[in-house]
Structures are given as structure tokens and as C-alpha cells.
Amino acid sequence: MSDELLKIQREYIRRRYDQLPEDMDQRLLAIREKDSFHFKAFGQPCTVSPDGITLGGVPITGPIGVLIALYVFHAVRDPVQIEPVKSFKQIKGTTPYHGAFSARSEKSLIPYVTGIRQNKETLLSVFDGKESEGTKGDSSFILYPLPKVPLQYIFYLADEEFPASVTCLLASNAELFMPVDGLADVGEYTAKRIVEIVTR
């Protein structure tokens, strides 16, 4: 499977470099160094070049590599408009992915709500995130798995009446920067990275 995913990743990168915009660094919110672009992806240093993608200094071949390639391929000039945030269900064309997004991006984090709250500062540092002001919930913050794909999380701790819950919201123009199936996967792999951080 990794071989197939690597082919997909390389094809997106090849097509992007075949028609590389002069302002690509601005589109990606990246630092340009000749034909390479440096930015943070899923909390790790990422470099994109004609030769491929590295994450944390290591060539990446799996699903996250495809997501980064999609982000690069679909890079546009538009700035991110976070407010008003919206649920995944509010994005057109996401119906086939509702169940997977809920299960893998939100419910998968419920067992770790307490640990997430305790490790909030670490998560904000790793993902270049920020706290959400004026938001309901016991804890809320915005993380940046990709520079133009922020995710807002709202956490409720369990109490006598209600179980713990997690809501993951997206920027109002999130679909400009990633296809909807890609957005679902960004939510899933960000959740996995969060769990990895709070359980290490």
C-alpha cells in the first residue's frame, strides 16, 4: 500500500512542480529555499522538493505524505478565514465521510480528554496552536496540522450528567485548501498525533 501511496504523492508533487507558481511560498505559508519549501506539518518540520517530501527529516511514504502532497497541489492565494468556524457536516460534499470523521477525528479523542487538557501547552507548541477565546467547553484551542488547515477543538470533561465529548471544527473556507476527503483524513491523523503526544 505504501508503494501505491508514494506513487500518488509523487504524481501530485510532479504536477505541481510542472506548473509552479512564483508565489508558492506565500500560498503554502512556507519558507522557500531554491526549489524546496519548508513548513510545519502535523507538528513536525516538513520539506517539499521535486524529489519528494520529508517529515521530521525522514522521507515519508504513507497517508500523511499524500495529505501533504494534496495541500501542496491545491495551494491557492486565498488567506485562511477561520471565523465563523463550521462543522465538517456543513461542508458541501462531505456526506460520505460524516461517520468516519466523527469516529476518527472526534470520538477517538474522548478517552484522552483529561490528558489533552493536561498537555495543552505541549500541543499548542507542537502544532503552532492558540487558545480559543469566548468558546464554550471545558477547554478549547486551535491547532494547525497544516499551515492553512486549522482545526478548532472543543472538549467537555465528563461530569455526573454527561460523558466527555470532543468537537472538531474547521475554518469557514477550509475546502479551498484541501478536498473534502483530505480534510477528513487531516482530522483523523491529527487526532492520532494528539494521542501519540499525550500518551508518550
Image: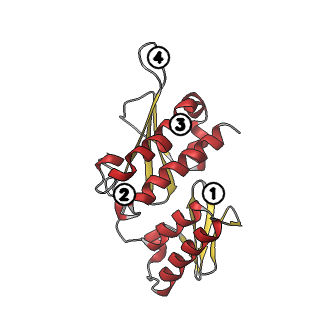
Numbered tag placed on residue 169 in the rendering? none
Amino acid type indicated by mark 4:
Asp
Q: Which residue is mark 3?
A: 109
Q: Position of residue 107 (x, y in %)?
A: 48, 36
For residue 94, above or below residue 52 = above
Q: Which residue is mark 4?
A: 159
First in sequence, mark 1 or 4: give its number: 1
Counting other residues with Cα less than 10 Å from the Cα at mark 1, is it few (<14), some (14-19), or many (20 or more)? some
Counting other residues with Cα less than 10 Å from the Cα at mark 2, is it few (<14), some (14-19), or many (20 or more)? many
Label 1 to label 2: alpha-carbon separation: 21 Å
Label 3 to label 4: alpha-carbon separation: 17 Å
First in sequence, mark 3 or 2: give its number: 3
Q: Secondary structure at mark 2?
A: helix
Label 1 to label 4: alpha-carbon separation: 35 Å
Q: Are marks 3 and 4 in contact (CB under 8 Å)?
A: no
Q: Which residue is mark 2?
A: 174
Q: Quadrant for residue 8, please give it.
A: bottom right
Q: Which residue is mark 1?
A: 44
